[in-house]
Structure formats: structure tokens, C-alpha cells
Amino acid sequence: MSKRAVLEVIALDVEDAVAAQAGGADRLELVTDMAADGLTPPAATVAAVRAAVGLPLRVMLRLADGFAAGDPDRLARTAHQVRDAGAEEFVLGFLDADGRVDLDAVERVVGALDGCRWTFHRAIDRAADRDALRKQLDGLPGLDTYLTAGAPGGVADGLPTLLAEARRGREGEPGYQQELLVGGGLRLEQVPTLLAAGIRAFHIGGAARPDGWTGPVSAEAVAQWRRVVDGVVDGVVDGVVDGVVDGD
């Protein structure tokens, strides 16, 4: 029997985290400042969320908008600070000006994580060469997940890439053994196709917020995604949930 699919929800604060847990999320991605596509939250927020919910948290390590690392030493210090606040899992990803993985920066930050598990985020969707990035990162301590839409424009554009990468993972190709966590313009009606391809992890942000990023996570919205991710797809087929799309 295939494992239960993972549903990861972006949380900005304790209220979001509690609602996501109530709706059936398996994991949180904890960030601040979605106007900048998600930056590292304050250590106090990490500690408060860690105390409020029992879900695994993946904390963003990103200091400014864009995919440049900035100061790797500052990033490493930030990683230590949020680890001290209770973070045990992380999200990161850095590219250079040519769209290649900034391996020095990634290795510097990963060194500060001391073996903690982490996701390489949607920077992969902006990489000049996705395959080369995966091969360069393969074997880094703790890397177990790629958050990706398959293309910069979102899952609708990237679906063929996602399906191909899932197949390469099933075939055991080096660099493709990490979990594919699909997010970025993800629509509920796309989930059954992804499940059929063996993909077992899904990431939502705006789709969990009926009032947009100015409003909180809705437990009911998360529960709707939970049902579809679990393979209860009647609502997708008859159009009840048609058109619900992740805004992340």
C-alpha cells in the first residue's frame, strides 16, 4: 500500500498553525513576509508555533527577496538562532546570477544545520539546469525534499517536468531520490494526476486562505485539500471544488 500523501501548509503565525493542524495538515512551512515570497520568521514566532502545535515545522532560511544567498555567515547565524528556538527542519535554496546553484552558500548553511532535514525550495524552478542542480546537491546532509512546480509559471506549465522527475525518481536515478513536494499554482483538480504518477507530497499557501494573504489559514480549506490529497476526489470530479488554486 502506498504511503499517505503529505500536505504541507504555509503558516505565518500561531493562528495559521493551529488552523492548519485542525484541517489535517501534516507539516508546516513557517515564513514571514509573503510580499517577498517568504522570509525567515523571528525566533519568537518559531518558539510560539512550536509550543502551540505538534506538527513538524520547516522554517524558511531566506533573508531577502530573490534567490541570491546574500551573506552566508548571517544565514548560518540565523539558522542557529531558529534552531535554538525549536526549529528542527528547514527550507532553503540559493542561485547565483547565472541561475546555477550557489553551492558554497548552500553548503555553508547546511553545515549550520548539523544534519537537520531540509527542503530545497522553488529556486529549482528558476535554475538554468534543473538536472545539474540536482546532481550537484545530491548527497548533501539532510536534503530530503524539493519544493517545485516544475516551471516558473506554476504547475500547469510544469506538469510534464514533474511527471518526468517522478519517473526518474522511481527508476532510482541519482539526484532524483528526494521527495517531490509539489506547490506553486497547484490546483485541486491536478492532484489526482500527480497522485497517479506516484507523487505523495503537496504544498499550499494562498489556497488555504479564502481571504488571501491578508487573512488567516482556514481549517475548512485545509480539510478540503486533505480530502483530495487522500484520494477522495468526488468534489473535484463534479466541480464542487473546481477552480480552487494555490496562490503560492
Image: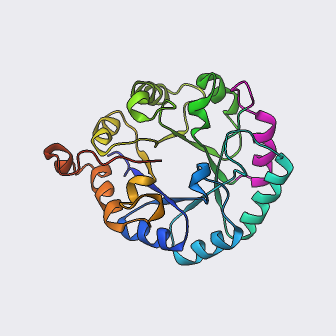
Residue at 53% x, 77% y is 52
Residue at 33% x, 61% y is 221
> From which residue to which does the magenta span run?
96-115
Q: Is residue 148 above or below residue 45?
A: above
On screen, residue 229 versus residue 17, left or right, reads left
Q: Is residue 162 above or below residue 225?
A: above
Q: Farthest residue to the right: give it.
A: 73
Q: Nearer the viewer, residue 75 or 195?
A: 75
Q: Is residue 185 above or below residue 228?
A: above
Q: How many marks?
A: 0
Q: Is residue 117 above or below residue 136?
A: below
How far across and down, in percent of the image, does residue 137 sit? 68, 33
> Which quarter of the picture shows residue 125?
top right
How far across and down, in percent of the image, does residue 11 sit? 52, 62
How far across and down, in percent of the image, does residue 215 sit? 44, 65
Judge whether residue 192 is colored magenta. Answer: no
How far across and down, in percent of the image, does residue 209 sit? 40, 60
> Which quarter of the picture shows residue 216?
bottom left
Residue at 42% x, 41% y is 185
